[in-house]
Every structure is written in structure tokens, then in C-alpha cells.
Amino acid sequence: MSIDEFKFYFLSGYSNKAEKILVREIKEGDHDSFKEIYYKYSEKVYLFAVRYISNTEDAEEIVQEVFSRIWEYRNNLDENKSFNGYILTIAKNIIFNENRKK
């Protein structure tokens, strides 16, 4: 294994561990951890939403709705599952539900 591969795996593992801690802290109601997750994922959720709806204002509203739901249902978070997958699934469901209403 090259040094670059080692760095990649080491840093990826550290990142996942740090994310698990943040998710656990969000479940406990920690606002600072929620802000950190927001700053880490809000742009990703925004770009994901824009791909499907092409309206920047609606995409911004979807970002807000996604994070509102995460906070509202924080007790259901599972730090052992992919947070990235979880958050994009929420975004996808919101987008599809909004499209059904139109």
C-alpha cells in the first residue's frame, strides 16, 4: 500500500468516526454538532436538489426542509449507518413529494 493510499484510508476512517460522534451528539440535542453537519452537507444537498428541480429558490427550501427534518427526527438517527445516504434519501423524498403536489 502506498503512502497516499494509507493517508486516504486513514483519513476516511477518521472522518467516518468523527461523523459518527457528530450524529450521536445531534441525537443528544447538541446544536454545535448540528451546525457542523449542516455546514458539511448543506451544499451537497443543495446541488443534489438543483439537479432534480433546476430552481435555485426551491433547492434552498429543500435544504432547509431536509435539515429541519433531521433535527425534528434526530432521535431516529443511527450513527452506524451512512449519514450521507440518509440525508440524500430525505432530500430525494422531499423532491418527489413536492413534484407530486404540482
Image (cartoon, rainbow, N blue to C red):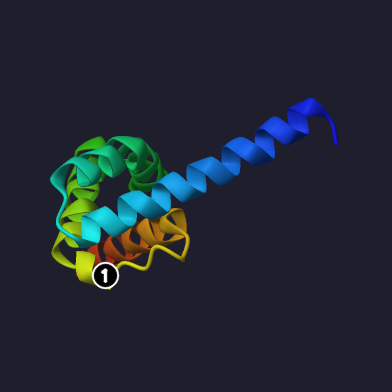
Left or right of 9? Residue 15 is left
Q: Quadrant of the N terminus?
A: top right
Total marks in image: 1
> Image height check: is 66 above or below 41?
below
User: Can residue 55 be seen from the camera position used here?
Assistant: no
Q: Quadrant of the C terminus?
A: bottom left
Give the residue type at disc 1: Arg
Residue 53 drawn at (x, y percent): 33, 48
Foreground of the two, 22 or 73: 22
- Looking at this view, name the residue that lies furthest to the top: 3
Disc 1: CA contacts within 10 A as few (<14), some (14-19) or many (>=20): few
Left or right of 56? Residue 80 is right
Picture quadrant of residue 69:
bottom left
> Image height check: is 29 above or below 100?
above
Q: Secondary structure at mark 1?
A: helix
User: Can residue 64 be seen from the camera position used here?
Assistant: yes
Picture quadrant of residue 56:
top left
Residue 14 drawn at (x, y percent): 53, 42
The residue where tag 1 is placed is 100
The residue under the point 26% across, 41% down is 38
The residue under the point 21% across, 64% down is 74
Left or right of 90? Residue 35 is left
The residue under the point 40% across, 56% down is 88
